[in-house]
Amino acid sequence: MDIDKYTSHDRVLVAVDCIIFGFDGSQLKALLIKRGFEPEKGKWSLMGGFVNRDESTDEAAIRVLHQLTGMHDIYMEQLYCFSDVNRDSEGRVISIAYYALINIADYSEQLQLEHEARWFPLNSIPDLIFDHKDMLEKAKDRLQQKVANHPIGFELLPGKFTLPQLQNLYEAIYESPLDKRNFTRKVLSLGILNKLNEKEKESSRKGAFYYVFDKAKYSKLHHEGVKFI
Amino acid sequence: MDIDKYTSHDRVLVAVDCIIFGFDGSQLKALLIKRGFEPEKGKWSLMGGFVNRDESTDEAAIRVLHQLTGMHDIYMEQLYCFSDVNRDSEGRVISIAYYALINIADYSEQLQLEHEARWFPLNSIPDLIFDHKDMLEKAKDRLQQKVANHPIGFELLPGKFTLPQLQNLYEAIYESPLDKRNFTRKVLSLGILNKLNEKEKESSRKGAFYYVFDKAKYSKLHHEGVKFI
DNA sequence: GCAAAAGTGTTCCCTGTACACCCATGG
DNA sequence: CCATGGGTGTACAGGGAACACTTTTGC
C-alpha cells in the first residue's frame, strides 16, 4: 500500500482481545492467560495482541487465536470497540474485542501449559487486567442474545452430543434451568438434529443417545436466524 | 497521560463515521454529505472524522456529530469496527461506525447548506465512498433488530406525534406494512403513551390525536428492553 | 355528499409453559 | 431391587395475526 496521505492526525495502537468460550459438559467457561510480564504481572487477562498495519482486525483476531490455541476455523464474531483513553495503563490503545466459541475438548493441554492458560467458570472469574472484565461481561450478554436466534450453541459442543448435554449448555448460557420436555420438543422440531444409534454411557446408567446435526439445515438456520429458545 | 510504552508496534489512524437516521413522517432517511475534496470529490459520504489521541471513539463520534449538526444529546450507539486494509484509498485507516437517531425537524437547513448535506431516503441512496454503503446497510439491520426490543423509535419523532406517524415509522424501518389495529393495541398496551387533547390536521380532514410519551415509563423500557413489535 | 384518513373489537390459531410418570441400566 | 438419570404427552393460557365497518371533516 501507499504511504498514508493523512499526515496531520494522531495515530494510535489498535489491539484485539479475544473472549474464548468453552463448555465442558456442565459449565460454561472462558479461557484466560496469566500475564508473565509487568505491568499487572501475574494477573489474568484475555488473549490479545496488536493489529499489524497490513491486516484487518478480523485477521488479527484469527491470528492471535491461532497463535495461542493452534486452532483454525473457529466461530468468532466482533464484539465491540473499547476505547477509553486510559483503559490501558501503558499507553493509548484501543481494543477491538472478539468472542469465540470453541469445543473445549479440542484445546490441547500442551498449549495450556505453554501459555499459562486456564479455563475459568464464568461465575468464578478472577481479577482481570484493564477493562477485560467489561469485555467478558459484554461478551456474555451478546452470547445470550445471539444464541436466542441462531443455533451457534453447537459450536461449543463436540461433533456428537446428547440432548441432556445440549440442555446443560443452554442452561449454562442463560444461567437458568429449562424444562426438559419443552426443550427437547423445541430443538427436535427444528429438524437439524439426527439421532445416532449410539449412547453416551459415562454420565448415567441408562445412557443418552448421541445426536449430530444435519449440516445443510444447520447452516441454513445459522445464516438466516431462527427463534431458537 | 504518559508516553506510550508499547514502542515496537504499528500505529494506525482511527476514524469514526456516523450513520444518521431521520424520519420525515413518512420516509426513513439518512443524512449524507458531499465530499468537497479529492479523492472521491463530489461523491457522497457519511459524516466522519479522525479520533484524537485524547478522546475515546464515543467522544469522537459525539464531537463529529456536534460539529456537523450542532446537536447535543443525540441517541447514538456504536455499530461496528470496519478495518479492511484497503478500505480507505488514502491510507491505513480503521473506522468505528456509529449510528444516530435524530428528529429530522431539529436539523437546521443552515447546517445543511454549510456542509452540503442532504437527507436521502434509504431506498435511493447514491454511491458512497469507501465502504460507507456497507456501514449503512449494517446500521439498517441493527436498527431493525434494536427497535424490535427497545422503544428507541421515538428518538426519531418530534415530541408529540400521532399514532399513524408512529406506525409509518415502524413500517419504514421494517420496510413492510403493519396492521393498524394490531399496531395501535400493541403500543398503547405498553402504557408509555399519553394522549393529548389536540389533533394534527395537516394530513387528514378528520385529524389524528397527538400523543407524547410518559418519560418515566419510557426510560424504564428503554433501559430494560421489551418485546416491542 | 363524497373523498380520505382515523379510529375501533373479535375470533382463531399457534406457541410457550407448566406439569409427572415410566424406562433402562449398573451396581 | 434400587438408585440414577433419560425419555416422553397433554392441557391451558396468552399473544400474534387476520379481518371490515363507522366516524369525522374539509371541500
Image (cartoon, coloured by chain):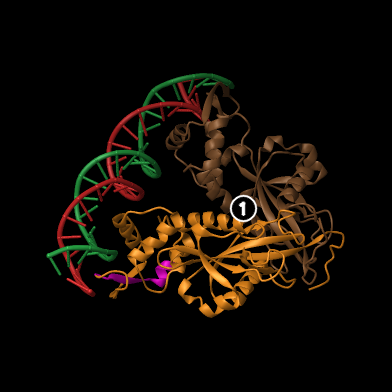
Chain colours: A orange, B brown, C red, D green
Question: Residue A12 placed where, x, y %?
Answer: 78, 62
Residue receiving disc 1: B139
Q: In this view, does D2 lie above or below B207?
A: below
Whether A208 is among the magenta residues is yes
Q: If the image is split into quadrants, where does the N terminus of chain B sit?
A: bottom right
- Looking at the image, residue A92 sits to the left or right of residue C19; the answer is right
Q: Is residue B132 above or below residue B215?
A: below
Visible residue check, residue B136: yes
Q: Nearer the viewer, residue A130 or A173?
A: A130
Residue occupying image coordinates x 43% and y 67%: A154
Residue range (magenta):
A206-218
Q: In this view, does B168 lie above or below A207?
A: above
Residue occupying image coordinates x 66% and y 37%: B103
Element at badge 1?
Answer: helix
Choose top left, top right, bottom left or bottom right for residue A184.
bottom left
Residue occupying image coordinates x 72% and y 67%: A38
Visible residue check, residue A72: no
Whether A205 is among the magenta residues is no
**Neighbours of disc 1 within 10 Å: few (<14), some (14-19), many (20+):** many
Question: Residue A75 placed where, x, y %?
Answer: 53, 68
